[in-house]
Amino acid sequence: MSEPIQTVPQEQCIREKIRQAASSLVQSAGLKPPLNLTLLKRYTAQLVEKLGLGNQGVEHFAMIMLNNAVWETYFPHIALNQRLLLLPFCLRKQPGCTAAHDELGLICRGCGQCSIPHLSDAADALDMPVLVAESSSAVSEWVERGDIQAVVGVSCLESLEKSFSAMLRCAVPGIAVPLLRDGCKDTVFDYEELRRAMSVPQNETVHSFTYHLIRQTVNELFTPAGLEEFIPDNMLREEAIHALSAHGKHYRPLIAGGCYAALVPEQTELPVYLKPIALAVECFHKASLIHDDIEDSDDERYHEPALHKRIGLAAALNLGDYLIGIGYKLFCHDSIPQGKCAELSSEASLAHCELSLGQAREFEALQQQNLRQEDCLEIYRLKTSPAFRVALFAGAIAAGRFHEFRELLQAFSDKLGVAYQLFDDLEDAEENSASIVDVLMKTNNWGREAAREEAIRMYHVQHEEIYEILEQLDDVPLKIFLYRLTGKVLKDV
């Protein structure tokens, strides 16, 4: 039996019935945004079954209504001027519309032949920005950059289905109003539903976030001029500054800063001590890359000769050690409150021990040619997870909320590190005796394709377990940040 075509219920009473049931489910189950696609589908199935609407093609509409209801609980913390009203081109009068458009969207002339001017005026009265565009491809980037924090969007069901995964991966707070009729001409939508979405009130306490300031601070810090303040003037200074600024996207300092911003969402300025903390995290990371290239006999890094190939083995080892020392020195910077210094250094030293132990276990297993599946996963946890954990812990310590979230951030980092390494192994086309794919081939006498399929299954298990961990979070800003981090690191939902 073929699946029913997904559609928007034309009867207003059915749409309202689904919307109210979604709101009730969110309240009774205590759901906190964001929800990933697996959970949304699971709860949607419950919702549709309870309403007796199974096999009627309303599942996708019900899922959108459920996602709306989840986000509506958080919308009051978002300032009205940080909510974007996103309208589709197809609302304009065709033929006859003479409005021009640029790379962003329609430049409405306000002629009054369609509903766009009326809707724009209503948004202006609420101080909401408006965009009339064919797609919302730039919205996630704007949210990440800090230009906006949420979206109220009108779109056809097909477009919403296509964009759903990307919006979930980026944890974009959003309320969607599906068009009642598609076809890109003479389209119709539920005006009352849009009015309700636009009118979600703003609380006195709003979350401003400082993600854009974090990115700006990190970009300015990791330049030769920005680093000179923190790197002592000696014979190693030039190479240290080059190692820290020349390459890489500085993800780990951004993670530390992002975690801080998520845990103090009402703060509008960054403390001065966030700079030395972010720099210390990157010092540790770059040192680990230098040492890793030496241990793995890699000749290149960033498509250039690896440091030990360029300046020699002994000099590269020394520079890596120096960066570690600078990192600990920065964790004791005068600007950092004394209690935070001790916690930062303690957690970083533990991570260094784990990373070294993971490397030692990998050496031993490879020399003895007895690397097993469970060994691989534990080595991944020890070698890769600590880098994520130190960055997240540093942000939580800087925010003064470390002990509140230590256990959860530990579990999250462990799973994220393993999932990231599995994902990385799947991208590796060459033979690698330390790769999970090669280990599965050897221990099970499998071909490469069968081993890859099992590695993919293992990856998805880790992936789902990450979201199970995040479902324990009641702190929505932190949950949003960790969702975005997961989507960026693992590149999927």
Image (tube, rainbow, N blue to C red):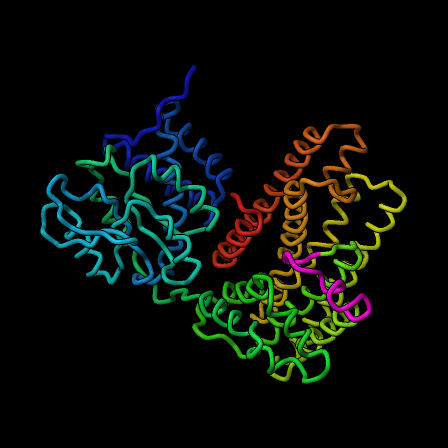
Residue that appears at 63% across and 50% down: 416
> In terms of depth relative to the viewer, which is nearer, 24 or 466?
466
Indicate the quadrant where residue 164 lies: top left
Is residue 329 found inside the magenta-colored segment of the image?
no
User: Seen in the image, is 134 located left or right of residue 290?
Assistant: left
Indicate the quadrant where residue 467 lies: top right
User: Seen in the image, is 366 located left or right of residue 432?
Assistant: right
Up-down relation of residue 192 to residue 140 (above or below): above
Residue that appears at 42% across and 55% down: 141
> In terms of depth relative to the viewer, which is nearer, 86 or 442?
442
User: Seen in the image, is 307 located left or right of residue 98?
Assistant: right
Up-down relation of residue 361 to residue 278 (above or below): above
Counting the numbered discs, the total is 0
Residue that appears at 20% across and 37% down: 187
Q: Position of residue 336 (x, y in %)?
A: 61, 79
Q: Position of residue 267 (x, y in %)?
A: 45, 71
Up-down relation of residue 493 to residue 397 (above or below): above
In the image, the segment drawn in magenta is: 300-315
Q: Position of residue 457 (x, y in %)?
A: 64, 34
Q: Can residue 32 be seen in this view?
A: no
User: Seen in the image, is 453 located left or right of residue 127?
Assistant: right
Q: Position of residue 105 (x, y in %)?
A: 26, 52
Indicate the quadrant where residue 12 lies: top left
Please state, as top left, top right, bottom left or bottom right, where the N terminus lies in the image: top left
Up-down relation of residue 5 to residue 238 (above or below): above
Residue that appears at 27% across and 59% down: 129
Q: Is residue 207 visible?
A: yes
Is residue 301 found inside the magenta-colored segment of the image?
yes
